[in-house]
Structure formats: structure tokens, C-alpha cells
Image: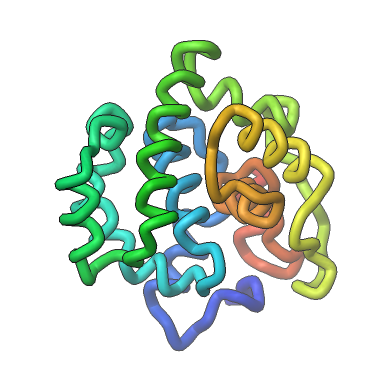
Amino acid sequence: MQRCGWANLNEPLYVAYHDEEWGNPCHDDQKLFEMLLLEGAQAGLSWITILKKRDNYRAAFDGFDAVKIAQYDEAKIAELMANPGIIRNKLKVNAFILNARTYLKMQAEFGSFDRYIWSFVGGKPKVNAWKSLKEVPPETEDSRVMSKDLLKRGFKFVGPTICYAFMQATGMVNDHTTDCFRYSAVRD
């Protein structure tokens, strides 16, 4: 079975992520929130590092419940900074809290985060036709526009490259290479 070149066959967690999750169009607010936070946590690191810690993140951050995260205080931040199961970067931990507060405002303003975030691709996935990983850009005009708007609204760790990785992960764009068995599966 042919997969995208980045889906390391020696890492079962990565293969499962590629085969079952990456690129599937997601319209669930809480899952979109989780993925935006995790993509931000990944800044400067490899995705497999975050993927291996995802369950720890879910436990540490109350299942990515934005209402709970938005209320975290200094005691909770200290607890998180002592948790070896997550990346203990104070800027990133604080960004989770700020992003939760901003996300809740966005839900109230737009009726759902999904409605807002998918507006950057016109409400439906953009389908690319990359033959190799070398063709896939690290960012696009859409991800730059998304990043600029998210930053303007108060989100942190949402640069254009992070936004593009988020768009790929949540199926806003189909960046499976054309020879990958998932390319047509996420199109149908």
C-alpha cells in the first residue's frame, strides 16, 4: 500500500495517524481546537514528538475543554510545568490558555469555530495534486491570511506554517500525494 513519504513505516503511531486521521475533513469544534493547540505545541519540534504525547496533553489539559482551560490559574500552570508528559514550555502553556479564551470568543461571535476556520478555504477542502513531498509548500496564501487573522484576534503560536500544518491535518486541504492510497479516499 502506497503512503505519503512522511508516514514513517517504522513508527506504527505515525502510520495510524496518516491512515486514519490526517487529511480527513474535520468540522468538530473541540477537535479543531485540539489540533490548533497541538500544532502550536509542535513549533520547533517534530510532529511525532507531539503525537507520542497527545494522550498526555489530553489528560493534562482536561480533554481540551476550552471552558476549563480558559480558567487555569498560576497553580494549574505550575502543575503543567511540572508534568513530564507534555512539552514544558511556559510560552506554549500560556498560549494554550490565551488561545482557549480567544477560541470561546470566536465561538460566540461566529456560532462555531468550525464556521470561522473553514471560511479560509470557502467551506470545503482544497484538493491539491502533489506528486511528491518536495512539491508541498510549507505555507500558502490561505495559511498566511488565516495566521494574520488569528494573530489579530489574540491567538498565539499560529504562524503561517503552523496554520498550514493545521489545515492539512484537519482536511481543509488534501495534501496526500497523488500516489497515496488516502488521496482519493479523502476526496470521496
Q: In this view, does 152 lie above or below 9?
A: above
Give the answer, above or below, for where 24 lies relative to 114.
Answer: below
Judge left or right: residue 26 versus residue 75: right
Residue occupying the point 61% across, 76% down = 6
State the colouring used for the structure image.
rainbow
Q: Can residue 59 be seen in this view?
A: yes
State the image quarter where residue 78 is shown.
bottom left
Q: Nearer the viewer, residue 97 or 50?
A: 97
Give the x, y percent position of residue 121.
73, 33
Q: Where is residue 165 in the image (x, y as percent from the top left)?
A: 62, 55
Q: Which of 40 and 31 is in front in this view?
A: 40
Tally the marks. Answer: 0
Q: Quadrant of the C terminus?
A: top right
Image height of 65 relative to 83, above or below: above
- State whether residue 185 appears in this view: no
Residue 25 horizontal/vertical position (percent): 56, 40
Q: Which residue is drawn at 46% across and 19% down?
A: 105
Residue 41 position within the rendered picture, expressed as x and y whole percent measured from the top left: 45, 58
Quarter of the picture containing the N terminus is bottom right
Single out the residue that lies furthest toward the front.
Answer: 74
Residue name at image x 73 percent, y 69 percent: 179
| Left or right placement of residue 138 versus residue 58 in this view | right
Farthest bottom residue in view: 10
State the residue in front, 94 or 186: 94
Residue 83, picture quadrant: bottom left
Q: Residue at x 52, y 11 (%)?
A: 109
